[in-house]
Image: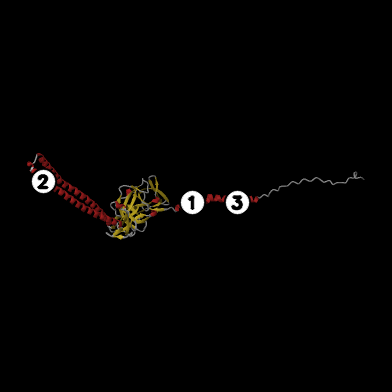
Amino acid sequence: MSALSNPTPTTIQAPPKSPAPIKIQEPPRRSGLYKGLLVLALIAGGVWAFNEFYLKPLQKKAEQKAAANTVRSAKVVLGPFKRIVRVGGITAARQFENVTAPRLRGFEGRSQMELLRLVKNGTWVKNGEELAQIDPGSQVEHMDDIKSTIAQAELDVSKRRAEQEVDTGSLTQTLRVSKSAVDKARLENQAAEVRTEVERELLKLTLEESEAKFKQAQNDIPQKKIGQEAEVKILGFTKERHVRHHNRHEVDIKAYTIRSHMDGMIVLSSVYRGGGESQQLQQGDQLGSGQPLLKIVNPNSMQVEASVNQTESTEIRIGLPATIGLDAYPEVKLPGKIYSIGALAVGGWRQNYYIRSVPVRFTIDGAHSQLIPDLSAYADVLVESTDNATLVPLGAIRQEGNKNFVYVKQGEEWQKREVALGSANNLHAVAKAGISAGEEVRVF
């Protein structure tokens, strides 16, 4: 059998099967977790509601009850009342002496003076005791020159007087010559009868001329003496000017030794040195004429120089007692009183122009070792005092408009009550009506 008639059998493959569809499995339901969360939420809501609507109101009521039981209160008392005004100031001495460098007269007063010796600060000195010594060296040398000038002026006066004596002698001789010429002319004129007319006329003219010269010589001598006296006076004035110049420097040199005129304590003045630093005067410093040198104070007679605001000045009166205190020494308390009040209010350097203060001076009774000048101090002025007054604490007073009220305890409640008040200090007010001593008032 041929190949064509018997073909080789071939295997026929079946078509590929389509993939089976993928089934998506649903997650298992967690019904137990959701139920747990719901239960927790319900519990939390219940706790919140219990806290908000039950516990907090109870706590608030308890707090209100506790607050009602812890209200601050105070008793209205009957006792002394004092109203005090505090005034700040600086301590100063009532009895003192300002000592300055000598004021030199003349153009030399502009020169500087060197300080040779100076008493120490805080030293107690007596009347007449030496305080300072200024170097007089330049003044002594200048006085030597003036003495030479005075001696020369005296020589000039003597020399001029001698010259004037010579001039006076010359005038006297001239007067004598003129007198002789007059006598001669008169003798010759007596023999004029035997002379010719021309000779007689010449003799007459000669006599007239001689008499005129003689008269002129007589008048010259007094005028010359007046001139000579004027010259001598001028020279005398020159001498006197130099003598006075010398005496002025003598006074200045005496002033170079500065002495005390009272008993007291020394307080040295301060000067500004290089860099603007303020220091006390010391040996070797250069002084100007009239420069403040020191102050002598009496510590047993001290005062406080202060100023009070013009709004409080109406309460200040001369003679009011005060307690003086020192800021640097709180333990020091001294009695005092007002002895001087300024007539006009003045402005301060560090305040606005429209703020005015009234100067006030306080005397300090007694003395203390720590009480010295230029300390910051204060004075508590007793402006009002009452022995028996109904005192209400300021913290218990409430104002409504122009009325004052307090809350007075009546049993377990606080009753609002109007009161009439008088003066007040930093702690209490004086009750005039509306409340009595011993009642309890609420303090806010």
- Which is more toward the observer, 108 or 68? 108
Tags 1 and 3 in contact by the CB under 8 Å rule? Answer: no
- Which is more toward the observer, 85 or 417? 85
N-terminal-most mark, 3 or 2: 3
The residue wearing badge 2 is 184
> Does dot 1 land on a helix, a strand or a loop?
helix
Q: CA distance from mark 1 to mark 2?
A: 156 Å
The kind of residue on which mark 1 rests is Lys
The residue wearing badge 1 is 61
The kind of residue on which mark 3 rests is Leu
Q: Nearer the viewer, mark 1 or mark 3?
A: 3
Residue at position x 39%, y 51% from top? 394
- Tell me the number on the disc at residue 40: 3
Q: From the viewer's perspective, tell me whether residue 167 is left or right of residue 272.
A: left
In percent of width and height, residue 189 lies at 9, 43
Regarding residue 66, the answer to whether it shows in the image is yes
Count of all numbered marks drawn on residues in the image: 3
